[in-house]
């Protein structure tokens, strides 16, 4: 980011009259705002997409009224949510009730800081990039628990409890499966990881170190589904048991925060899979020829993965709580360890040869 | 700095019947290089501001943790304190530790705390109007301790020389994941393994005590 | 990096055995009631590790600069392995009788021994801390092992909370020491501080250098001492001891009064005599006071106890006081003092384990239920000599030894300790020690009075499982042999500490 600003100042002399830190600050804020706006729009698209996918899978059209094939539906919903009355239950713990959606929202969106849309289109290329995402997204649990507890509603509390247990359990396979991609890249920086996969789809980490890269990718994707509370792991929000889980009592704007955070998290999972296993911004074949398309390719890959999540949601039934824990601790975790081991063994073999 | 180190080094090599001379030598030379790297890295003014903000908030969070009457609030303030401390780590160029701090403490341990507090359904603790008879004694002892700590912290040696100069700040690259990994798997291999056994033991113990 | 793997072979063996025990428990003995196989594996693992030690002792070996295998470490590892295997032997039947025969017991026991072994070899505060934690966490679990017994739960919880606090203090001391000296390595700190002493002495006579008189250094010393004193149960950090010792399963108590204490003292030897040797004027005074308080309080409160387990707990506090006396003395007479400390720890291990084993073996009939329950009170011992003269005689040996009556190990041990104090011109300290021994005679011999001179009040029975009796014989014989032929062992002890300096 600083390099970018410095470059800018070198090119446009009139900028030198401003103090440099101020410019940095402005650049930071601008970048954040752009990311926030872009993700928000994308998320609204996802909300619409989800309803369309659901509709078509159930042999119906989904929203058709607002705009052509209902493409303005999300905006209409958004306006409705913004204009709705803001209700805070009388017995709720007010400060926590107010802060909770903000924490969840911030946690979901601040992770995008390190997402590399292309080689230079990245807000901050931290050298601990992927680990930063894990840490920040683990903060959302606190928001979820706060929401569930402060609502003073047993369904909300149940939902929060389930969600916390689920997220904490699935964080472990997530972290270990990601290592299967971090190891061959030799870096935690998102940019370096993508660069390590350059030169065609056969270099992507999903196809490297067979079959461990592929298995690790699947493990990550499954565990990440659980982390973002999506079907078949959506027991924290199981509507047939818990009304709506931890956001039962929320309405209007605050509910919108949760809603946006959920879809933003879905896209985040898509971008992580893209970055770590699917070659990031690169076109599958002859990547250098299609370099100008990089950001678009990246977003398209993410959208495709989000579509897979929706597809799964409308295909698979929900798991029971004990099955959920079983999958995490007795299936995903051992296989993730095996992947880590296998990838290291491959690397050892290839390096020593 | 280097002169002093050389003296210590020569002393060590001469007088200690200690088999790891090479290690000490390499240890000292490593410190020297890191210090040189540090020299090129200058502290900026804003670091001080950030430090003051982080540390003030951390202390505030710690105080609120202790004084909050609702245990849930206590835990949340503790999480806030951890976040500020992670900010302090980041200021010290230890990004990896900073993120570990968030992921492990704020993300996992605090959530477990919240979990337990909610399971136990701890109600707000009524304000104790009647203090325990021993409270004044405790207060006096605490004040004495605080005074001692202040003396310890603000003590300035009257003579020349002070604390060891070998702990001068380290370079920018010191806190990266690569460096930490390399150190963990070479110099600190054994402690690392012992720590892993410790964690295994803790898991086994927890299962033993909890099952059935 | 050249790693000398042989140096950590015993630790590797213990780790593998512990994992093996857990594995066997998972795949084989899980469906069986009898867990003797686990105990056998445990014992053989400890045996192999024990037999390996003498082969490694030819010279001081290091694994990395953090880990040394010098004669002192080997000596203490042998103490840990002996007391650990004794504990495993006496536990076999005890756990069965109490209905908590779980295979994990032996795994956790092995992990705690591993922690102690790491502590004995650690040349770095980080490794010391990790070994300490491994040991204590294992003991949190072990002391709460009787899950349905409320007092066992209480013991585990108390130990956990207070132990965590003590560990935090210790860690804080380490970090302050790191701040002052710039290293966590004991050899480095020792060299650095000694160098500071010299520069101080060079400039003005009688003026120490700025580093040595820096308050942060004293603060770290106090923190380290507080943490260690907690582990060895010295006054004023002893409050947990009676409750935890009483609540924990007796076999665990027996080991807890020996293993962690010995490990705490070996760390104390390394930290105080080597790392902070330059500060001896400071820690000598503190430790002398702690030692006197510990001896006196332990002995006087022990008199008031009717519960034998609690009484032995206070007695173990008092013994920590005697050992601390030896450490104070070794500030002035390095070799003799620390050799007497090492010697006393070994003798104490045998006699104290023996006393606890007799307590563990003795059971009485509960008047209400008619079941045999562990005997705890003094009354339960009355008339034991008539029902089981052999057990009574063994208890006599152990009690004589704990009091310090010849020809037992306790006498020789105390003799060396007090002699080193006299050599160090600390006659007054030795006198206090002797007075305390005299006080302790009251409550140790009171048990014998009950055993030999009173009529039985309850129906007693003594555990007659062979494993327990093997251990009991070994301990009684060792107690006597050390008392009769002390020179042999004392030379070993002396040789082991010489490598320290």
Image (spheres, rainbow, N blue to C red):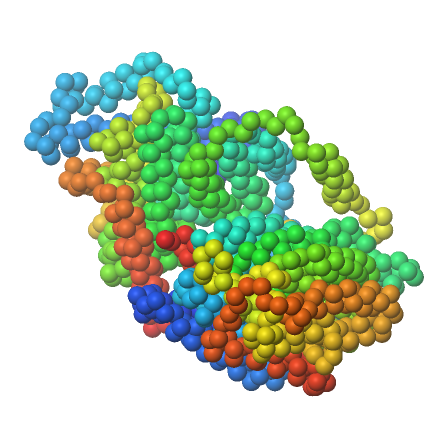
Residue at the (81%, 68%) spot, across then down: C434
**Which quarter of the figure is the C terminus of chain C placed in?**
bottom right
Residue B114 appears anywhere in the view = no
Q: Is B156 situated above or below C330?
A: above
Q: Position of residue C366 (x, y in %)?
A: 49, 59
Tell me if I can see residue C430 in this picture: yes
| Residue at the spot 47% in from the left edge and 55% down from the top edge | C368
Q: Residue furthest left?
A: A59
Frontmost residue, C51 versus B157? C51
Residue A116 vs B205, above or below: the answer is: above
* Residue drawn at the location 15% of the way across and 23% of the way down: A63
Determine which quarter of the picture holds residue A301. Answer: top left
Most extreme residue toward the front is C455
Nearer to me, C343 or A130: C343
Above/below status of C21 relative to A62? below
Indicate the position of residue A189 as horizontal and vertical percent values.
41, 49
Location of residue C380 in the rendering, given as x and y in whole percent from the top left corner: 58, 63
Q: Is residue C42 left or right of residue A36?
A: right
Numbered circles on residues, count:
0
Please tell me which residue lies in front, B48 or C411: C411
Q: Is residue A234 left or right of residue B65?
A: left
Residue B36: % across, % down: 64, 55
- Residue at the spot x=50%, y=36% of the render? B75
């Amino acid at each position: 980011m600083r390099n970018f600003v410095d470059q800018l100042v070198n090119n446009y002399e009139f900028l030198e009259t401003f103090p440099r830190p101020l410019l940095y600050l402005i650049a930071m804020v601008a970048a954040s705002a752009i990311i926030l706006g872009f993700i928000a729009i994308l998320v609204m698209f996802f909300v619409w997409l989800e309803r369309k996918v659901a509709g078509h899978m159930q042999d119906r059209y989904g929203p058709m009224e607002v705009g052509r094939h209902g493409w303005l539906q999300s905006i209409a919903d958004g306006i409705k949510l913004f204009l709705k009355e803001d209700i805070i239950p009388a017995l709720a713990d007010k400060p926590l009730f107010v802060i909770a959606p903000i924490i969840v929202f911030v946690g979901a969106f601040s992770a995008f800081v390190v997402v590399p849309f292309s080689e230079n289109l990245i807000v901050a290329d931290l050298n601990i990039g992927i680990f930063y995402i894990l840490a920040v997204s683990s903060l959302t649990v606190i928001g979820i628990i706060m929401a569930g507890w402060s609502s003073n509603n047993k369904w909300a509390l149940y939902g929060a409890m389930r969600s916390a247990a689920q997220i904490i359990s699935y964080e472990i396979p997530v972290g270990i499966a990601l290592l299967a991609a971090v190891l061959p890249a030799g870096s935690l920086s998102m940019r370096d990881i993508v660069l390590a996969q350059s030169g065609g789809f056969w270099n992507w980490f999903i196809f490297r170190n067979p079959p461990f890269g592929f298995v690790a990718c699947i493990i990550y994707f499954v565990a990440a589904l659980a982390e973002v509370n999506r079907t078949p792991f959506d027991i924290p929000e199981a509507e047939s048991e818990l009304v709506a889980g931890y956001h039962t009592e929320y309405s209007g704007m605050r509910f919108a925060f949760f809603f946006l955070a959920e879809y933003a998290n879905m896209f985040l999972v898509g971008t992580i899979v893209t970055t770590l296993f699917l070659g990031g911004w690169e076109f599958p074949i002859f990547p250098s020829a299609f370099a100008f398309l990089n950001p678009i390719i990246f977003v398209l890959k993410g959208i495709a993965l989000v579509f897979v999540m929706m597809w799964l949601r409308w295909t698979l039934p929900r798991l029971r709580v004990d099955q959920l824990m079983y999958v995490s601790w007795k299936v995903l975790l051992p296989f993730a360890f095996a992947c880590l081991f296998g990838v290291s063994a491959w690397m050892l073999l290839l390096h020593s040869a | 700095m280097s002169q002093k180190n050389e003296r210590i080094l020569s002393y060590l090599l001469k007088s200690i019947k200690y088999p790891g001379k090479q290690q000490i030598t390499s240890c000292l030379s490593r410190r020297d290089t890191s210090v040189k790297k540090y020299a090129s890295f200058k502290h900026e003014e804003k670091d001080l501001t950030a430090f003051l903000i982080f540390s003030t908030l951390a202390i505030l969070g710690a105080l609120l943790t202790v004084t909050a009457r609702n245990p849930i609030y206590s835990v949340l303030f503790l999480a806030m304190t951890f976040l500020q401390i992670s900010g302090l780590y980041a200021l010290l160029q230890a990004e990896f530790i900073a993120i570990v701090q968030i992921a492990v403490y704020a993300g996992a341990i605090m959530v477990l705390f919240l979990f337990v507090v909610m399971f136990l359904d701890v109600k707000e603790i009524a304000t104790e109007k009647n203090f325990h008879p021993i409270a004044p004694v405790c207060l006096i002892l605490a004040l004495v301790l605080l005074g001692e700590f202040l003396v310890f912290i603000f003590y300035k040696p009257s003579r020349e020389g002070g604390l060891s100069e070998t702990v001068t700040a380290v370079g920018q690259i010191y806190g990266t994941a690569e460096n930490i990994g390399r150190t963990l798997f070479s110099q600190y291999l054994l402690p690392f393994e012992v720590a892993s056994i410790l964690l295994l033991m803790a898991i086994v113990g927890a299962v033993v005590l909890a099952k059935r | 990096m050249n790693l000398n793997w042989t140096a950590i072979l015993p630790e590797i063996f213990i780790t593998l055995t512990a994992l093996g025990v857990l594995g066997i428990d998972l795949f084989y003995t899980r469906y069986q009631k009898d867990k003797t196989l686990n105990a056998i594996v445990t014992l053989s693992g400890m045996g192999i590790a024990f037999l390996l030690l003498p082969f490694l002792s030819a010279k001081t070996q290091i694994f990395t600069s953090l880990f040394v295998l010098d004669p002192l470490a080997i000596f203490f590892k042998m103490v840990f392995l002996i007391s650990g295997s004794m504990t495993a032997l006496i536990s076999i039947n005890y756990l069965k009788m109490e209905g908590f025969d779980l295979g994990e017991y032996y795994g956790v026991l092995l992990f705690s021994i591993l922690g102690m072994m790491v502590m004995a070899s650690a040349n770095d505060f980080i490794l010391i801390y990790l070994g300490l934690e491994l040991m204590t966490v294992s003991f949190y679990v072990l002391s709460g092992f009787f899950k349905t017994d409320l007092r066992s739960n209480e013991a585990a919880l108390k130990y956990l909370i207070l132990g965590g606090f003590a560990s935090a203090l210790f860690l804080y001391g380490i970090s302050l020491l790191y701040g002052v000296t710039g290293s966590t390595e004991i050899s480095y700190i020792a060299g650095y501080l000694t160098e500071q002493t010299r520069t101080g002495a060079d400039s003005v006579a009688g003026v120490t250098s700025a580093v040595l008189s820096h308050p942060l250094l004293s603060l770290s010393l106090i923190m380290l001492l507080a943490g260690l004193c907690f582990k060895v149960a010295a006054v004023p950090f002893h409050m947990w001891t009676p409750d935890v010792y009483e609540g924990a399963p007796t076999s665990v108590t027996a080991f807890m009064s020996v293993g962690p204490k010995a490990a705490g003292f070996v760390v104390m030897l390394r930290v105080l005599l080597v790392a902070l040797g330059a500060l001896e004027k400071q820690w000598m005074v503190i430790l002398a006071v702690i030692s006197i308080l510990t001896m006196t309080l332990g002995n006087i409160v022990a008199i008031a106890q009717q519960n034998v387990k609690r009484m032995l707990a206070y007695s173990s506090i008092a013994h920590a006081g005697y050992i601390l006396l030896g450490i104070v003395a070794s500030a002035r007479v390095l070799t003799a003092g620390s050799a007497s400390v090492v010697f006393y720890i070994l003798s104490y291990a045998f006699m104290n384990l023996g006393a606890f084993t007799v307590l563990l073996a003795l059971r009485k009939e509960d008047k209400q239920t008619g079941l045999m329950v562990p005997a705890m009170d003094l009354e339960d011992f009355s008339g034991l000599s008539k029902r089981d003269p052999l057990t009574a005689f063994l208890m006599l040996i152990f009690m004589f030894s704990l009091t310090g009556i010849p020809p037992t190990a306790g006498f020789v041990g105390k003799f060396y300790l007090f002699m080193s104090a006299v050599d160090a011109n600390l006659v007054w300290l030795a006198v206090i020690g002797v007075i305390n021994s005299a006080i302790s005679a009251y409550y140790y011999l009171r048990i014998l009075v009950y055993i030999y001179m009173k009529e039985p009040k309850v129906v007693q029975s003594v555990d007659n499982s062979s494993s327990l009796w093997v251990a009991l014989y070994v301990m009684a014989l060792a107690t006597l042999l050390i008392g009769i032929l002390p020179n042999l062992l004392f030379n070993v002890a002396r040789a082991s500490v010489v490598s320290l300096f």
